[in-house]
Image (tube, grey):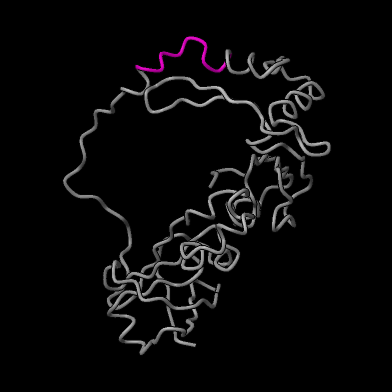
Amino acid sequence: MLAEPPAALLLLNLEPGLDVPTALRSVPMAIAFSAFRPTDDSALKVVLPIAPFSENAGALINAEGRVQTFGPVVGPLGQSRAAWKVLRVLADQLGLAGFEYDTVEAVREAALAGVDIAAELARTVAAELPATIDFGAQPAAGALERYADVPIYAVDGVVRRARALQATRDARDAGSAGIDAATWERLGLQPGDRVRVQQGDATVELPARLDATLADGVVRVACALSATAPLPQLFGAVSVQKV
């Protein structure tokens, strides 16, 4: 992820084992700011409790380009605090300038000072695409290619811990290996079967699901899930075997 590993890394609302499973291997000091205890905190030195968005005041820019503010539904739980307050205290302790804010309104004013929101939203990028794109080494004939997405109910710590959302069909399907029709037939799979997916030296075992939307030779194995976290790359060649 980084050309040179930093001496320390601060993670805001990220769970190391799910969101950045390989990024912390060479980082000597990793600190997480989180509203939840990460599912895998073995790579962390410290976890600082912060309030989720529902217990915090803030602002967003809507589709019309208007700044909308919101307040907390309830106060922060226990000793947790808004992330900007935790950062401000750390900056004070470290003698860093640029964090001297006393209110969330002051933070918002500083963030939006001199920003033409309408112009930013209307900005376009003029770029010429090459006639051909080199994607590097291509999979060997007959090899399977992993396609990894982030499931809708695995995008952050809030939805990951929402039992009602995890009971939906979308969440259940996300934990399975989506198999294209040709590979499904070649492996002789049936509904309810399980498959072993291998990428490099890592192997996971998942329920198999026929996915007619996939191109031949493509296997959908989602990321940001505990069941698939051992796989090292979001894309690339994989092998699939019926269990």
- Is 115 covered by the magenta stretch? yes
**Quick check: 190 left or right of 16?**
left
Instruction: Reply above or below: 43 against 69.
Output: below
**Quick check: 181 left or right of 105?**
left
Residue 12 at x, y = what percent? 64, 39
Query: Residue at image x 58%, y 25%?
Result: 70
- Is 109 covered by the magenta stretch? no
Query: Residue at image x 68%, y 47%?
Result: 27
Instruction: Reply above or below: 186 against 158.
Output: below
Query: Residue at image x 71%, y 36%?
Result: 51
Q: Which residues are magenta?
A: 110-118
* Residue nearest the observer in this picture, 192 or 143: 192
Residue 229 at x, y = what percent? 57, 63
Query: Residue at image x 29%, y 71%?
Result: 212
Residue 216 at x, y = what percent? 27, 73
Q: Quadrant of residue 105?
A: top right
**Quick check: 144 left or right of 22?**
left
State how many labels appear. Answer: 0
Q: Quadrant of residue 123?
A: top left
Instruction: Reply above or below: 194 against 92.
Output: below
Residue 42 at x, y = what percent? 75, 57
Q: Quadrant of residue 162?
A: bottom right
Instruction: Reply above or below: 241 against 20.
Output: below
* Residue nearest the observer in this picture, 110 or 51: 51
The residue positioned farthest toward the left in the image shown: 131
The residue positioned farthest toward the bottom in the image shown: 188
